[in-house]
Image (spheres, helix red, strand yellow):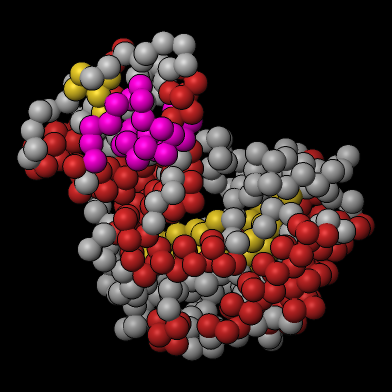
Amino acid sequence: MDIFEKLETLANSAKYDASCASSGSERKSPFGSAHISGICHSWSGDGRCVSLLKILLTNHCEYDCAYCINRKSNDIKRAIFTDDEIARLTVEFYKRNYIEGLFLSSAVIKNPDFTMELMIKAVRKLRLEYHFGGYVHFKIIPGSDSRLVNEAMRLADRISVNIELPDHKSLEKLCPEKDKYSILKPMKYASDKILENKKNRREKFAPAGQSTQLIVGADDNTDSKILNLADHLYRNMFLKRVYYSGFVRVNEDSRLPMVKEPPLLREHRLYQADWLLRFYQFKVDEIIGADSNLDLRFDPKTAWALKNLDRFPVELNKADYETLLRVPGIGLVSAKKIIKARRFSNLRFEDLKTLGISAKKAVYFLTLNGKYYGLKTENKDKIENLLLEYKQDGLFDDKTAEKTYLSANTGNL
């Protein structure tokens, strides 16, 4: 099999891994880029679509995970890259301006340690022999030795250990060869090394941090379970990102749910809720409330506001920054603009668009100079219906959101 056939096979095998965005790396080199704005095969923080070479070292696998296209019981074309092939492909693609970095993952060949050794060998060659200073995201294989995790962190800008399923019962059912401990051990080791590095500043270990991925819809776990896990990881493992990947049924297996399409809208809502946890000072129980799952009709901040109409409307010209962040249609950037602009004069309704505020969305939750421009009613259903009509007009259409995920990347909720 020539290198181009391998590339086609192993790039296709890697497409279900969503953990491939980067930020925060400033590795300096005359060759390659690891700019702080991010290098990914998705959307950067400022909404740009950027690219990287996302491949598997191999799709030969010793495991038989029910949902995975590369599981050992599947009759698919198999391939494996050599270390030199990975290094040369990355460099040649970079020289042609096709990519800005490398995302390297792998199925498990022989055992986790053997697989990690092959991956490290490839990235070491890329760094030391080809002098590539660009972004590298390295997928840690669960169950691998801490010594190998340490070496991978020296070479990579970001590492990730994919949890995939939110609890150990689902893991036992769908991935019998994996266990909770084998996933959390390297994740905890990585978080400790990153913290140690920040304190001592002696050596860079994965300067862009670590991330993980959760599959949404492969089991019956609720959004509450998923978000509580994500919140725990952010607070205790200091993860940069948790990625949510809508379940795609690629295998016929009685353990898997019968779904025709991946739950993209649910995935999108989880990304929005995740942003509220990290940057809007929301708690999980506020976002979910008494329900176990997110309301798919509205973004989670609007859903929260509709349940808490007694807190609204707020006065745009007086509310503090934290209160403004709770208003639907006002995002992180627009809240800062409001604080800055009102130092000079009181804001009017006409100023909302200039400030980047979704006026037709925010109007039900704020006043300007004491005047309320929304629907004067305490009937929540009427406001909900107006917001739903607004969505149907295409002004914040979730079908578009499913394709772009832009609001979840920019944080303007």
364 or 81: nearer the eye?
364
Q: In this view, does 59 lie to the left or right of 410?
A: right
Q: In this view, does 144 lie to the left or right of 334?
A: right
19 or 319: nearer the eye?
319
Q: Which quadrant does the C terminus fall into?
A: top left
Task: Tell me if residue 57 comes above or below residue 387 in the rendering.
Answer: below
Q: In this view, does 19 lie to the left or right of 370?
A: right
Q: Where is residue 58 in the image (x, y as percent from the top left)?
A: 66, 71
Numbered circles on residues, count:
0
Residue 265 seen in render: yes
Q: Position of residue 253 (x, y in %)?
A: 36, 81
Q: Is residue 317 on the magenta stretch? A: yes
Q: In which quarter of the image is residue 114?
A: bottom right
Q: Where is residue 71 in the image (x, y as percent from the top left)?
A: 52, 79
Q: Which residue lies furthest to the right in this view?
A: 129
Q: Which residue is drawn at 63% across and 65% down?
A: 160
Residue 13 seen in render: no
Q: Residue at x 27, y 48 (%)?
A: 304
Task: Tell me if residue 333 comes above or below residue 22 in the rendering.
Answer: above
The magenta-colored residue range is 311-334
Q: Quadrant of residue 144?
A: bottom right
Q: Is residue 368 left or right of residue 114?
A: left
Task: Tell me if residue 31 comes above or below residue 247 in the rendering.
Answer: above
Q: Which residue is drawn at 46% across and 24% down?
A: 339
Q: Which residue is drawn at 37% across and 13% down?
A: 346
Q: Is residue 199 on the magenta stretch? A: no
80 or 26: nearer the eye?
26
